[in-house]
Amino acid sequence: MDRRDFLKACSTVAVASMIDPSVFSNMLSAQEGMFKAYKKALLVKEDGSPLREEDLKPHNSYIFFYPYASTPCYLINLGEEVKPVDVKLKDGKIYKWQGGVGSKKSIVAYSAICSHQWSYPTKQYSFINYYPPDKPSETTKKSGIIQCCAHLGVFDPKEGGKVVDGPPEVPLASVVIQEEGGKFYAIGILGVDQFNRFFETYKRELRETYGSTAKAKELVDKCVVMEVSKYAKQVIHC
């Protein structure tokens, strides 16, 4: 499917998904195993009310947990239209990323687990963060990027999370967000699956935080969205 056909299909799917959300999931699942549907989860504010587009300030970083109770994701309003793109992996495989959602097509969501060695935001600190256009990284001098300070992996949120610099070999996995009646839902993950490695690497830490591995791996049907600075005591930029 070339880009023109893909965009045409997305237009059709956007209408169809208002009636049957599974239509969008079925199209994505055909992408050579790069999409995996999980529980459909409503994004809500801290008070439990549905998250609305106007709640997301441009270039602020917001965190939520999906598809598991322990797997953090970033939600960012990039302030401008973000178009669908082809994401190419090192092995030559290509998958289609949906671009932004919302009225301006400016809202994107990614796994906040670095695809290199799985650094992730905790309540104590966050080494992987978004750098707005007016606040470039001191080390890489890049802005408008997601950067992990653990090993200076740099990802482009406007390009499907592709690797811009550093040791990561695969892009950040993206969270597929669907809008219905002004509400936002996470419906699955698009990209290279890193969850098994994440759970294995941080087994002890996750047990301590969530009480058991089973609780850490619970699938969610509702995601509380908050600013990263409210979640992590230290938001580390480098």
Image: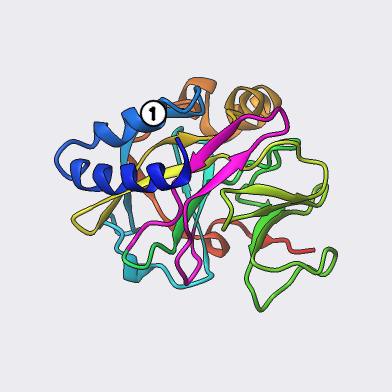
Q: Which residue is mark 1?
A: 37
Magenta span covers which residues? 76-102
128 left or right of 159 in image? right
Apparent side of residue 41 relative to residue 16 in the rendered image (left or right): right
Question: Residue 82 in magenta?
Answer: yes
Residue shown at 57%/39% (left/top)?
Answer: 173
Q: Is residue 213 above or below residue 119?
A: above
- Residue 50, position in %: x, y? 26, 56
Q: Quadrant of the N terminus?
A: top left
Q: Main secondary structure of the magenta part?
A: loop
Of 24 and 216, which appears nearest the observer?
24
Kindly tell me whether residue 185 is visible in this rendering: no
Q: Nearer the viewer, residue 33 or 126?
A: 33
Which sits in the foreground, 125 or 20?
20
Q: Position of residue 151 (x, y in %)?
A: 83, 47
- Find numbered disc 1 in the image and state the secondary structure of the residue it sits on: strand
How far across and how far down the image is residue 233, in percent?
63, 60
Q: Residue at x 70, y 68 (%)?
A: 143
Colour option used:
rainbow
Left or right of 152 in this view: 184: left
Quarter placement of the C terminus? bottom right
Judge whether residue 237 is colored magenta: no
Q: Amino acid at mark 1?
A: Ala
Q: Which quadrant would residue 140 be assigned to in this image? A: bottom right
Please name the residue shown 47% across and 40% down the image. Answer: 2
